[in-house]
Amino acid sequence: MILAHQKIDFGQIPLIEKVKARAPFRFQFDFPDEACLIYVLSGHTTIHSPAESAAVQQQDSVLLKCGTYFSALPDTEEDFEVVVFHLPKEVLKNIYTTGLQEHEHTKQNQFINAFKAHEGISAYIRGLDFYFKHPDVANETLLSAKIKELISLLLQTANAEDVQELLLRLFSPLEVNFREVVEKHIFSEVAVEDLAFLCHMSVSTFKRKFKEIFEDSPANYLRRKRLERAAELLKVSEASVSDIAWQTGFNDVAHFSRSFKSVHQLSPKAYRAQFAK
């Protein structure tokens, strides 16, 4: 649930937001024409894109390219608070009159670039509190200067080269491959609705496409793959049953145990003991 929400607009466009939330809550972001920087003030979560996932915690910064993302807050009493900077292409064109030029790139492109913020960025974030309390003071001239300052600070981090690369490619389209999206998230705590969202599809269209490619329903396929992986881990890993459940995409150990026993006719513990002998 959302506990608090403040925002600062650039003209009619939301530019900077501060959001405080607590589980149970799922964020879904669809950025077709903008990039985004997220700074984590408190709490932790995992952000999922079509191609990768990134665990983030307090004082982490995350640059998100144009695309779709979701995050489910962990079931704790800890508040999750972030400052979100929207970076629409038209706003950046307004701020950078010379434009952001594309060039040849040698690095593999990413949807997500997460890094630990240095003190300069942390101090910059703290300095925004005045503008959240008095949003009318933040005119377009001031906000243009603040965004330039932010980008300058990002380019002074240890990840400066990666940040520059990503900034220059924020609006380059990335292909979303259906099979790759599914395979990347088999062992993540994702629902069918989340996978459909990452693929820019309705749930019904996603299920039809899934059946065509994998010749199975999403629920059956994901369950089978996760249980196969769990069986492998029980044979070779010393991790606890609960850890293995979490590693293979089950967020409920009891449900994992029931599902495992329905396939192997043994509980996870008994299955492991059988191979130990």
Image (spheres, rainbow, N blue to C red):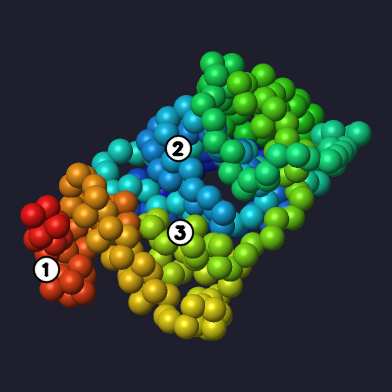
On residue 250, which mark appears? none
Instruction: Judge whether 196 appears above or below 80 on screen.
Output: below
Q: Which residue is mark 3?
A: 185
* Distance Cα–Cα, label 2 vs label 1: 36 Å
Kindly indicate the quadrant of the structure image that contains residue 134: top right
Q: Is residue 142 visible?
A: no
Q: Amino acid at mark 1?
A: Leu
Q: Secondary structure at mark 2?
A: strand
Instruction: Judge whether 256 appears above or below 124 on screen.
Output: below
* Distance Cα–Cα, label 1 vs label 3: 27 Å
Q: Nearer the viewer, mark 3 or mark 2?
A: 3
Which comes before the other along the chain, label 2 or label 1?
Answer: 2
Do the residues under discs 2 and 1 have CB atoms within 8 angstroms?
no
Which comes before the other along the chain, label 1 or label 3?
Answer: 3
User: Residue 72's x, y, as percent?
Assistant: 40, 52
The residue that appears at 64% across and 55% down in the rendered structure is 67
Which comes before the other along the chain, label 3 or label 2?
Answer: 2
Q: Which residue is mark 1?
A: 266
Q: Nearer the viewer, mark 1 or mark 3?
A: 1
